[in-house]
Amino acid sequence: MSQTDEEKLAEFEARIARGEKIEPGDWMPDEYRRQLIRMISQHAHSEVVGMLPEGAWITRAPNLRRKMVLLAKVQDEAGHGQYLYHAAETLGATREQMLADLLSGKAKYSSVFNYPTLTWADNAAIGLLVDGAAIKNQTMLAHCSYGPYSRAMVRICIEEGFHKKQGLEMIIRYAQGTPVQREMMQDAINRWWWPSVKMIGPHDSDSPNTPVLKRWGVKTKTNDEVRQEFINEMAPILLELGYTLPDPGLHQDENGDWRHGPIDWDEFWQVVRGNGPCNKERLAARQKAHEDGLWVREAVAAYAEKRQSVMAEG
Ligand code: 3HC
């Protein structure tokens, strides 16, 4: 006798409660599938758009070693995007539709990539702060109930660890460097601190997706919990190096947690709605890259068609 939807949902939730992974062929609520396609495709878009701010500095790295490290990092981000687009495809999303949604401006990607990288030190700030915030979030997602996403996160977090370390190495180096280097680094921290704090998502009170994502084990922590972990890790590192943080309200409470001051969420939502400093530039760059790649897609399609006709002729 076939199960009712209520029985299927009860079994699905019992599996999640037991810590089982949901795999592509398993029964899942439509909302679970929709939420995962939403999150994973936006995550993939973020990785691909996230290549642009740092990519602008590959040709202007201060020395060969920095160039090689930055090249490796940007290349990693491209790979992360591919893993994640593929993870979304296991849920029935198509690459074509996901890319069309990004290129039309319909799909979201992380707010943090809509800011300019004005000096070389921005790459250090991105490495420690942006990738540091991403690792907090992605370490959580590595425990996600959806198998392909959690497994992609395990691989991605290992590579993000290198991204964060190379950022920290530069931040330490410039803290001990010339006054010009210290000033350049402080300026970058001033500009990247708040975008990194906000990229983790709105306050839990303004996070409509979190309840269902927590219920079904996609998120194991809320946005504010991940944000607190991030600030608790980063504030002492930067303050101990002699840098300041652009948050006059930042203080340590009686439990040792670093409490942030008021967050300008109006600015955040402006960026999410496409009105940030670099939104138009980032989208134009992705649209141009897609147009420039048309000949490659056509060549691959022609080869596949030719190969199929040769195979058919036997
Ligand atoms: N930028 C853009 N949109 C954001 C956002 C951000 N930083 N934070 C939240 N939003 C959007 C959400 O997408 C949602 O809109 P939608 O329903 O239309 O999709 C709305 O704001 C409400 O936010 P919620 O908190 O309800 O949304 P979520 O529960 O999905 O939480 C999230 C937001 C924590 C970003 C979650 O989506 C998530 O964990 N996503 C996967 C990780 C990810 O995308 N990280 C992006 C950075 S990747 C990166 O940094 C690469 C690294 O290599 C540097």
Image (cartoon, grey):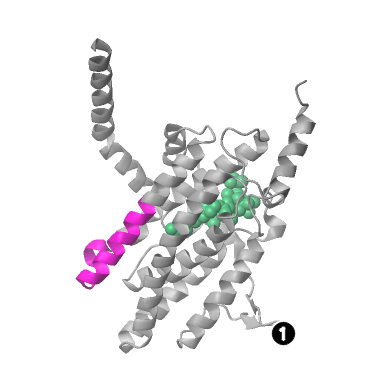
How many marks are shown on the rendered structure? 1
Horizontal and vertical percent for residue 135?
50, 63
Q: Residue under label 1, please give it.
A: 254
Residue nearer the viewer, 201 or 213? 213
Asked if one can make out residue 113 in the rendered structure from this viewpoint, the answer is no
| Residue lying at 52% horizontally and 65% vertically, measured from the top left | 133
Q: Is residue 237 left or right of residue 117?
A: right
- Residue 173: horizontal and vertical position, in percent? 34, 82
* Horizontal arrangement in the rendering, residue 302 relative to residue 155 (left or right): left
Residue at 76% in and 29% down: 5
Q: Tell me if residue 232 is in the magenta stretch.
A: no
Mark 1 CB near ligand 1 (8 Å cut): no
Quadrant position of residue 35:
top right
Q: Is residue 63 magenta?
A: yes
For the stretch drawn in magenta, the main secondary structure is helix
> Is residue 223 shown above or below 285?
below
Q: Which quadrant is home to the C terminus?
A: top left
Pointer 1 local density, CA inside 10 Å: few below 14, some 14–19, many at least 20? few
Q: Position of residue 123 (x, y in %)?
A: 36, 68
Q: Can residue 112 be spotted in the picture? A: yes
Three-letter amino acid code at the position of disc 1: Glu
Image x and y of residue 46, in percent:
45, 51
> Is residue 147 rendered to the left or right of residue 216?
left
Residue name at image x 27 percent, y 24 percent: 304
Bounds of the magenta segment: 58-78
| Residue at image coords 32%, 55% | 75
In the rendered image, the vertical position of residue 240 relative to residue 64, given as above or below = below
Question: Which residue of the protein is positioned furthest toward the top in this rendering?
Answer: 313
Which secondary structure, mark 1?
loop
Quarter of the image where the N terminus is located? top right
